[in-house]
Amino acid sequence: MTRIFETPLYPYRRSRDQDASSPVRHQAVVVGAGPVGLAMALDLCFHGIPVVVVDDNDKVSFGSRAICFAKRPLEILDRLGCGDALVEKGVVWNRGRVFFDERQVYEFDLMAEAGHKRPAFINLQQYHFEKFLIDRVGALQAAGKPIEIRGRNKVIGIEAKPDHAALTIDTPEGTYGLEADWVIACDGANSSVRALLGLDFKGRVFEDNFLIADVVMQAGFPPERWFWFDPPFNRGQSALLHKQPDNVWRIDLQLGRDIDKEKEKRPENVIPRLKAMLGDEVKFELEWVSIYTFQCRRMEKFRHGRVIFAGDAAHQMSPFGARGANSGVQDADNLAWKLKLVIAGLAPERLLDSYDAERVKAADENLLNSTRSTDFITPKSEVSRLFRDAVLDLSEKFPFARPLVNSGRLSTPCILDGSPLNGPDAEGLPAATRPGASAVDAPLGPDWLIDRLGGRFQLLTIDAEAPDHLDVDGISVERLVLSADDDQTGTLADRWLGTAWSALYLIRPDQHVAARWEKFDEEAVRAAVNRAAGRG
Amino acid sequence: MTKLNTEAHIARPDDFYAALIALHEGRSKAESDAINARLILILANHIGDQGVLQEALTAAADSRHATQK
């Protein structure tokens, strides 16, 4: 059987642009067809911007790579028409177990909070994730939308001009030139666009090696996440077992520093390690093996004129907490509507600087969290290991120590406090839905609040009066009329009203709260829309 | 905000001190280090307040403070 990640899904095809006498200009070119590039392309298409994706490859991700997709990116992919496919295929898990040395020290239930359409996260191989997004691109194409992926189109040159960028693309049939008003570089940690422009990428390098093995087994293991610190089968190191769809299990073994990568990757060396972990009697097949080290670093700025960086190209972090692909999809979510307003002439170019401000803040939060997890999992000093082991020891008997155990803090959306786009806040309303927060879901009878938000500016009113429509110098603001009574569980009121009787929220196209009030004041709402569009 | 209490607060100081030393009697350096680490974590949790903990961390790290006595 040919595996999905070995099949060309967007094979090279000659484009008309290759035969043009001078480079053809496009509005938006996305570099890279990974999870972030694909989400970026779908979001631009959603906003009606023609988009060309160029990728040096013609297949989905080789091996599972990113395997945890969090709630927020799932909500974004819902807006882009892929959410159901992803969630139906993904594995939802709730129980985690933590082992230290030879014993289980504790287990936990995620006890997902009720009243959300999407789970806290799903496990899903990156190649499935990408496949669903590519399918969606195909469906849009079939419907006549201007979106295309050009396989085996590698960017080998870029010239940044004040009002566009000129790209040189290499293909199996030679090179050609392409111009773009906007280039969004989603070409990963080793971004060639970044390298070609000679831009910085600073941070911390970690020396520990990790072996990833995806094994297919009909095992009796439950769909749980098991994490070992210093287990007998991998002394002094850590190990992780995590379930993916199709009976694929992710095994992640820390190998330490100064190892021979090529030697460790050979099946004759990998299989005994896995047998020591799984037991001799368990039958399994190796699907994919890789050894990685990682780095926590980011670009100083994500926007460089007409070239904008997103995902790993802009920020790279350790895998603990699943913050790579998840934050990259949120980069796309943040950027697409801003580009739309700028291209449509409804917002000044400086609106795009808020992408920088907001996503750099998010990247720093993600980097901080993933660095802390890394330091707990791979202690760098004797005293750091001493406290780590003390925490694990205590966690068996004392609940207080369990929150200190850090085997990864799962990706949650960054609340964009202090963003230049945020407008006024109102007292008495819940902190979780303050300006800068991404909309917190709530049930609305059989429907979900999150499904009624996004894609345009909205004025969400809960038991408050306001006009059904406002035009703010070309930006249309639609009212979404709700009442606390729309949700008999009281969740909507808890999450959006707090102690207030009424509330109005200005919601951005990326489902983030821009401003909120208790009562309607047209001038205040207009000012907040202008501010959120970078016109303030 | 609660402040770190640096006034004498232990009713029978000699008894506490003797118990602390007794805890480490006959232990290896590694065992003692582990006990101390666990003790710090248990006490820190009992305090809870981040401000007080930060004051305690600073006080412990300030060597002049420690040697002035």
Image (cartoon, rainbow, N blue to C red):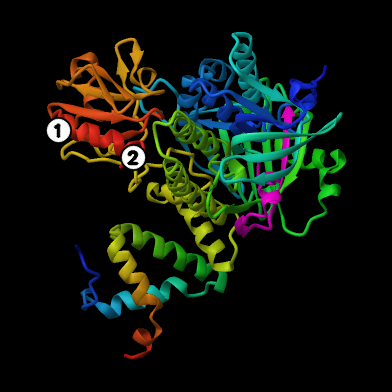
SS under mark 1: loop
Magenta highlight range: A188-216
Separation of residues labelled 2 and 1 (CA atoms): 32 Å
Under circle 2, the secondary element is: loop
Q: Camera-side residue: A471 or B18?
A: A471
Pointer 1 indicates a residue of which chain?
A
Upstream in sequence: badge 2 or badge 1: 1
Q: How many residues crowd mark 2 within 10 Å: few (<14), some (14–19), many (20+)?
A: some
Badge 1: residue crowd in 10 Å (few <14, some 14–19, many ≥20): few
Left or right: residue A2 compared with residue A456:
right
- Residue A220, visible in the rendered structure: no
Estimate the x, y position of residue A20 in percent, counting from the top left: 76, 26
| Label number found at residue A27 | none
Q: Are marks 2 and 1 on the same chain?
A: yes
Q: Quadrant of residue A462?
A: top left
Residue found farthest to the front: A21
Q: Is residue A72 visible?
A: yes
Which of the two residues, A200 or A375, is positioned nearer the viewer here? A200
* Residue A296 x %, y %: 59, 53
Is residue A489 found inside the magenta-colored segment of the image?
no
The spot of residue A36 in percent (x, y) is 59, 33
Question: Residue sitting at 63 percent across and 9 percent down?
Answer: A142
Image location of residue A361, percent across then percent down: 44, 49
Instruction: Residue at 65% x, 32% y: name it.
Output: A34
Q: Is residue B39 left or right of residue A213?
A: left
Residue under pointer 2:
A535
Three-letter code, disc 2:
Arg
Q: Chain of mark 2?
A: A
Q: Amino acid at mark 1?
A: Thr
Which residue was labeled with disc 1? A499
